[in-house]
């Protein structure tokens, strides 16, 4: 009780419950009883702490919808990284990718878990592709690193958000061996999460949007919203991406 009350001085109730869960887990591992978390007096204390702190204001991040994606692409700076960013954004949206599935965090590229050029195949051929396959070395839903193959279909001609066309342009103008990073922020350096987000914020600001309203998962949320409009549930949308990613049309 005293420990919970002490935590309540500076920690939100949700975190206190998490702490108690971890303590309970340690007791279970040691085959010791621990039922204090279900005790009514502890629950009352946590409710009191919640009233003391009040409800924290929530500002949920907005999804990056197709029109906003178009705004981002049209406001990317004309730089050597343009083709890499364009392809990364279009593929992230169309394939419902998590940020960690196509960027690196920590500055080190690991070919066993990060995307390489060899992970993408334009089909039926590189000159006139109608779709592409993308092999994720690992993902949140693939803890054993077996690899997940995603099929990405091309959008109609002249659609600026077409992921297949973006990949085709990237491979044509910046060819690389199969064992180098698929997306780069500079020559030989894989696209980092920080660089990816910084470029998005700059493009959003240039396009008249508030960058703070968006986050790294906004691409995934926007694409999921599109699939929901098409009649898929959230679960159905995620399952569908394993078969055929959402085209940018």
Image (cartoon, helix red, strand yellow):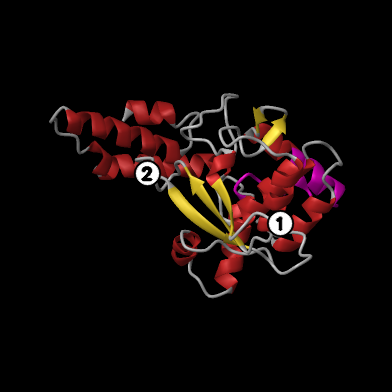
How far from the left and from the top, in percent, is residue 96?
Answer: 56, 55
- Residue at image coords 12%, 31%: 31
State the residue in front, 151 or 173. Answer: 173
Provide the secondary structure element on which disc 2 rests: loop
Instruction: Say whether residue 97 is visible.
Output: yes
Confirm or deny contact between disc 2 and disc 1 (CB under 8 A): no
Boundaries of the magenta span: 199-217
Q: Which mark is residue 165?
A: 1
- Going from N to C along the chain, the mark reached first, 2 or 1, is 2
How far from the left and from the top, in percent, is residue 95?
Answer: 57, 55
- Residue at image coords 25%, 34%: 24
Decide: is 15 above or below 162.
above
Provide the secondary structure element on which disc 1 rests: helix
State the residue in front, 180 or 127. Answer: 127
Snapshot quadrant of residue 125 = bottom right
How far from the left and from the top, in percent, is residue 223?
Answer: 61, 60
Quadrant for the C terminus, please: bottom right
For disc 2, the marked residue is: 146
Decide: is 238 above or below 3.
below
Quadrant for the N terminus, please: top left
Instruction: Say whether residue 64 is visible.
Output: no
State the residue in front, 182 or 20. Answer: 182
Q: Is 45 contained in the magenta span?
A: no
- Residue at image coords 61%, 67%: 226
Give the total of numbered labels.
2
């Amino acid at each position: 009780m005293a420990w919970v009350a002490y935590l309540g001085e500076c920690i939100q109730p949700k975190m206190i419950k998490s702490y108690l869960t971890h303590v309970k887990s340690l007791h279970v591992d040691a085959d010791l009883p621990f039922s204090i978390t279900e005790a009514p007096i502890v629950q009352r204390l946590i409710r009191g702490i919640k009233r003391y702190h009040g409800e924290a204001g929530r500002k949920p991040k907005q999804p990056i919808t197709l029109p906003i994606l178009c705004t981002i692409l049209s406001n990317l700076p004309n730089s050597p990284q343009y083709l890499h960013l364009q392809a990364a954004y279009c593929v992230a949206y169309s394939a419902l990718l998590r940020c960690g599935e196509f960027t690196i965090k920590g500055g080190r590229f690991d070919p066993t878990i990060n995307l390489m050029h060899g992970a993408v195949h334009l089909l039926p051929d590189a000159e006139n592709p109608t779709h592409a396959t993308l092999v994720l070395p690992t993902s949140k839903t693939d803890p054993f690193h077996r690899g997940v193959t995603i099929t990405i279909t091309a959008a109609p001609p002249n659609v600026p958000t077409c992921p297949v066309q973006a990949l085709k342009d990237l491979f044509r103008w910046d060819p690389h061996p199969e064992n180098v990073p698929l997306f780069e922020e500079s020559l030989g350096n894989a696209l980092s999460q920080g660089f990816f987000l910084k470029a998005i914020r700059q493009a959003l600001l240039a396009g008249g949007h508030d960058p703070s309203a968006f986050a790294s998962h906004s691409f995934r949320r926007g694409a999921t919203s599109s699939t929901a409009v098409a009649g898929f549930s959230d679960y159905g949308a995620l399952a569908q991406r394993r078969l055929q990613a959402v085209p940018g049309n």
